[in-house]
Image: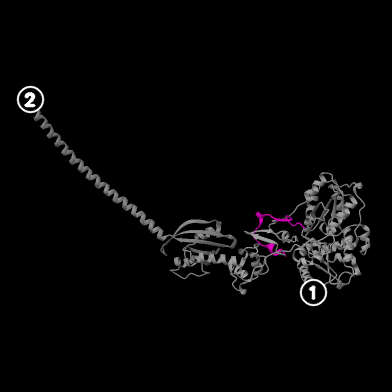
């Protein structure tokens, strides 16, 4: 199957919670720079990550637009309805749901269960008594199971029943009934069916989920409720066993007493299926037939059922509905041959060729997250992996990151925080709403511990006036840059007081600015002294300048008088 783009992750929504990694049974989620994404070559499309993601970051391929377009262009749209629909749409009978869909433009609605009988007949041929000894046939109805075998148990490829699933089989039957040019839509609770619908064996035009079908119908609530009887067709009815296919053990029902309990195994839930496949691979047992369903309880617990009913409630609805179907018919190979319907298919091994690191490489990665010995390995699963070693291997393979180890990152963050707080020159103190000291760092003792002992549980009022703390608590606002002087401690401080209502705490960061204040005061005094000295010097200079100017004035006058007398004397001698 083409698993690419069947499940995608919106990067903007990923919150590094690793729930998708924890939920994935085959660890097909890669984490790069804190962003989760599906690894297509590892993914089995079970859909657990889609269901688990709290941010709804995982999205599945939407083909509902194909249904809308087909109806809009007047195509003959035939919906193949998975038999688990009765649990997904408990408010409708098949007739009611058919009426609504026809009103919305669909030509016909047919139960996929009608194809189940054909699949059962094909299975019957493959589990005949004359089959090779120790050859176990594994059901291939569930595309997740097919993916698991192809990717993780390729040695069991030949054990997969080479038979089309009911969905693919039904598409063939629909085209035989309605013509090759009809538009076939499959609706069911399975995400993996979307990829199966794109396979080489598929004659399905689009695959939608029950969630999407309900959404589509709700958008067409204004459709006329009167049904055109000419559009309703007499369609093949399902058998009891066919309608039981979506519940665990349902695939075996058509066989009845044809097989003994020792010959068959019915297993549901991925973890249980993996255990059985492991046993088959090791030849620990070899039944004739294994009915394997990926979802616990069967298809009624599919990831896109669109209902949160209890599993037993859904099972009861299926079983009660099945009672109204045609009685079982034991699958016979001759019936299948007479129908001239080719349901054969092949499988291709797609092994996961992941490189396993050497023991030394694993230990080196473990050391990077503080795991120096087995006792350091908490195996808490917070990163999504069952063990620290599994996570280390994933880091080596490039699908996980060192910082996914939450206990280590928490310890590292707390260590850094403690180092910063413990070595801070600022006093950091936390009190509750009643001003009782809850935490403090060593700097608090250096500032305020010279008078009395400071301890957790004492009242802050015993140290100093805490009215600012009370104001911050009452108003819920930060106080920033508040200058507070404590003469009794001989210090001047600058404070930031931060209320934390969520934890009923008030945290203060107190900076001792005494030395700074003294330097500032000394600087101010130096400036004043400089100004005073400068003024004194200027005054003296002015006085000297004035004295010099006076002396220069007298000398200038005497010089002028002497020169005039000299001129007059010279003029007198010339005239005589």
* Location of residue 573 (image quadrant): top left
User: Is disc 2 placed on a helix, strand or loop?
Assistant: helix
Image location of residue 505, percent across then percent down:
56, 62
Image location of residue 12, percent across then percent down:
65, 54
Residue that numbered label 1 is attached to: 284
Q: Tell me if residue 6 is in the magenta stretch.
A: yes
Q: Quadrant for the C terminus, please.
A: top left
The colour scheme used here is one colour
Q: Which mark is residue 140?
A: none
Q: Is residue 135 depicted above or below 218 in this figure?
A: below
Q: Residue furthest left?
A: 576
* Location of residue 476 (image quadrant): bottom right
Q: How many marks?
A: 2
Q: Residue furthest top?
A: 575
Q: Which residues are magenta?
A: 1-25
Residue that numbered label 2 is attached to: 575
Measured in 3D between alpha carbons, the distance from the residue under mark 2 to the one under mark 1, in whole angstroms, is: 158 Å
Residue 263 seen in the current view:
yes
530 relative to 470 in the view: left or right: left
Q: Counting other residues with Cα less than 10 Å from the Cα at mark 1, is it few (<14), some (14-19), or many (20 or more)?
A: few
526 relative to 190 in the view: left or right: left
| Front-lying residue, 283 or 528 | 283
Q: Earlier in the sequence, mark 2 or mark 1?
A: 1
Q: Is residue 225 depicted above or below 369 in this figure?
A: above
């Amino acid at each position: 199957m083409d698993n690419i783009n069947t499940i995608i992750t919106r990067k903007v929504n990923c919150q590094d919670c690793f729930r998708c990694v924890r939920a994935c049974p085959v660890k097909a989620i890669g984490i790069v720079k804190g962003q989760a994404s599906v690894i297509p070559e590892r993914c089995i499309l079970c859909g657990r990550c889609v269901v688990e993601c709290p941010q709804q970051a995982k999205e599945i391929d939407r083909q509902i637009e194909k249904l809308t377009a087909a109806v809009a262009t007047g195509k003959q749209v035939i919906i193949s309805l998975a038999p688990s629909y009765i649990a997904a749409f408990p408010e409708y009978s098949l007739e009611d749901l058919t009426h609504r869909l026809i009103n919305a433009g669909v030509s016909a609605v047919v139960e996929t269960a009608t194809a189940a009988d054909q699949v059962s007949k094909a299975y019957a041929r493959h589990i005949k008594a004359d089959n090779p000894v120790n050859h176990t046939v594994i059901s291939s109805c569930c595309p997740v199971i097919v993916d698991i075998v192809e990717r993780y148990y390729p040695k069991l490829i030949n054990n997969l029943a080479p038979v089309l699933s009911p969905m693919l089989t039904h598409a063939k039957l629909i085209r035989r009934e309605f013509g090759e040019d009809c538009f076939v839509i499959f609706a069911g609770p399975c995400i993996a069916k979307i990829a199966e619908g794109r396979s080489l064996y598929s004659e399905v035009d689009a695959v939608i989920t029950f969630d999407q079908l309900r959404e589509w119908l709700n958008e067409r609530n204004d459709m006329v409720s009167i049904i055109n009887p000419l559009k309703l067709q007499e369609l093949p009815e399902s058998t009891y066993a066919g309608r039981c296919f979506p519940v665990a053990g349902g695939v075996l029902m058509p066989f009845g007493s044809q097989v003994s309990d020792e010959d068959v195994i019915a297993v549901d839930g991925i973890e249980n299926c993996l255990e059985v496949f492991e046993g088959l691979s090791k030849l620990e047992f070899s039944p004739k037939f294994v009915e394997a369903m990926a979802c616990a309880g069967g298809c009624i617990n599919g990831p896109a059922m669109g209902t949160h009913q209890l599993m037993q409630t859904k099972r009861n609805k299926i079983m009660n509905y099945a009672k109204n179907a045609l009685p079982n018919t034991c699958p016979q190979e001759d019936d299948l041959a007479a129908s001239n319907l080719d349901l054969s298919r092949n499988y291709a091994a797609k092994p996961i060729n992941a490189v396993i690191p050497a023991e030394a490489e694993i230990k080196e990665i473990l050391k990077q997250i503080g795991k120096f010995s087995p006792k350091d390995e908490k195996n808490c699963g917070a990163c999504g992996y069952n063990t620290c070693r599994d996570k280390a291997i994933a880091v080596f393979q490039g699908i996980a990151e060192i910082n996914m180890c939450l206990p280590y990152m928490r310890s590292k963050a707390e260590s850094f925080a403690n180092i910063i707080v413990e070595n801070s020159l600022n006093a950091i103190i936390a009190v509750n709403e009643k001003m009782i000291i809850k935490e403090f760092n060593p700097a608090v003792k250096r500032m305020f511990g010279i008078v009395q002992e400071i301890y957790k549980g004492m009242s802050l009022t015993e140290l100093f006036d805490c009215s600012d703390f009370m104001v911050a608590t009452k108003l819920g606002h930060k106080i920033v840059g508040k200058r507070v002087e404590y003469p009794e401690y001989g210090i001047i401080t600058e404070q930031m007081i931060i209320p934390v209502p969520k934890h009923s705490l008030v945290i203060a960061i107190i900076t001792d600015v005494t030395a700074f204040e003294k330097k500032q005061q000394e600087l101010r005094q130096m400036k004043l002294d400089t100004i005073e000295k400068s003024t004194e010097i200027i005054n003296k200079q002015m006085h000297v300048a004035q004295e010099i100017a006076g002396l220069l004035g007298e000398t200038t006058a005497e010089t002028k008088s002497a020169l005039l007398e000299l001129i007059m004397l010279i003029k007198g001698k010339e005239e005589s």
